[in-house]
Amino acid sequence: MTSKLSTRFFGLDLNSPVIAASSSITGNTAQIIKLAEAGAGAVVLKSIFEEEIQHQLNEELNLRADFNNDPEYLDYFDYVIKDENLRKYTKLIGDAKLAANIPIVASINCVTSGEWMSFAQKLQDAGANALELNLYVPGSNQKLGSADNERIYFDTIAKVLDLVSIPVSIKISPYFSDLSSMIVKLSQTGVAGITLFNRYYMPDIDINEEKVISAEVLSDTNDYVLPLRWVGSMAGKTACKLAGTTGIHNGETAVKFLLAGASAVQVASSVYRKGPGFITELNGFIEDWMNEKGYQSIDDFKGKLSMKKLENPTFYERVQFMKHFGEKEF
Ligand SMILES: Cc1cc2nc3c(=O)[nH]c(=O)nc-3n(C[C@H](O)[C@H](O)[C@H](O)COP(=O)(O)O)c2cc1C
């Protein structure tokens, strides 16, 4: 079925550009059904986390320290814990596919390009329509240079593309030394889409208790400006489609991303705050705006305000506030 809101992302035809982003909400079949009923173009399942499973494995081994020198035992536990997590995740994919009539995208969080990647094939076999790699190599290891860290991205993508035939997309951070060339090079690897930019856990400090705490988990309404700038700067210059995520809290912002050149937007924080109805709200706003402007399809206006299409692209290039803002008196 095609609708006025039809678009393509994840290498798939979607009935709406509004995607339920990976989060704990999308780790539960009952919620996934509600997101589908609310009109989500696709649901990205909660990521299966390499680090989380490794942590669980280490805890189990600490509890059973007596056996820790026995390689057969270690292998056994490694297998059991990974298998258990994988079994739960493949069941979620199967249940979601049966219950919701929209594309289900499995998500792997990977911090290395190791054995972990072999899981991708199992997620495909479980029925996922596409795969999203939630890629983030923390640049905290001072022994590794940017080229070493960046290689992990390309190695991981190459391994996964080798293992699966379903389309693979990636979601990345803005933390690269040469962001625009990295986005272009990543787009040329064979991925179907790149989502700019993921939001991460951030530490904060409680000055009364004098301890490190978690910063606010959900995004703010103005957080969209960084991904918007980069979607607008890169649209039309990449070998794959782009989507935006972070800070999309209303219909206006969703339309801005489409005008900047995104094929879709991924939302999480506002779904936490407002429930699945937020997706219906965004779809309604986009459609009303299109009707008002006389657009028949998303392609009619997608990228109209990207840097590539603008006669004067300096809005995307400018980084300093300069004179105009500096003159304000306080
Ligand atoms: C509580 C929470 C859990 C999340 N879990 C995941 C996850 O498992 N995998 C992932 O790729 N992104 C995860 N994200 C990131 C979201 O998918 C989304 O890209 C990001 O929050 C930006 O969108 P937003 O501003 O609408 O929240 C999570 C976000 C939140 C708030």
Image (cartoon, rainbow, N blue to C red):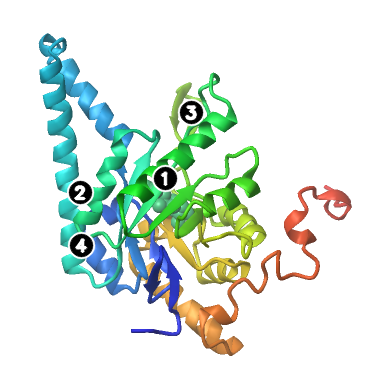
> Which residue in the structure is indicated by mark 1?
158
Q: Can you tell me whether the CB of the residue at mark 3 lies under 8 Å from the nearest atom of ligand 1?
A: no
Q: Can you tell me whether the CB of the residue at mark 1 lies under 8 Å from the nearest atom of ligand 1?
A: no
Residue 34 is tagged as none
Quarter holding the N terminus is bottom left
- Considering only order in the chain, which callout, 2 or 1, is on the residue closer to the N terminus? 2
| SS state under label 3 | strand
> Which residue in the structure is indicated by mark 2?
89
> Which residue in the structure is indicated by mark 4?
96
Mark nearest the camera among 3 and 1 is 1
Mark 2 and mark 3: span between their CA atoms? Answer: 36 Å
Amino acid on which the number 1 mark rests in the picture? Ala
Kindly indicate the quadrant of the structure image that contains residue 109. top left
- Residue drawn at x 60%, y 78% is 301
Amino acid on which the number 2 mark rests in the picture? Tyr
Mark 3 and mark 4: span between their CA atoms? Answer: 40 Å
> Which residue in the structure is indicated by mark 3?
206
Report whether 59 appears left or right of 319: left
Mark nearest the camera among 4 and 1 is 1
- Considering only order in the chain, which callout, 1 or 3, is on the residue closer to the N terminus? 1
> Compared to 256, does 126 lie above or below?
above
> Compared to 47, does 116 lie above or below?
above
Q: Taking the image as drawn, is residue 17 in sight?
A: no
Mark 1 and mark 2: span between their CA atoms? Answer: 23 Å
| SS state under label 2 | helix
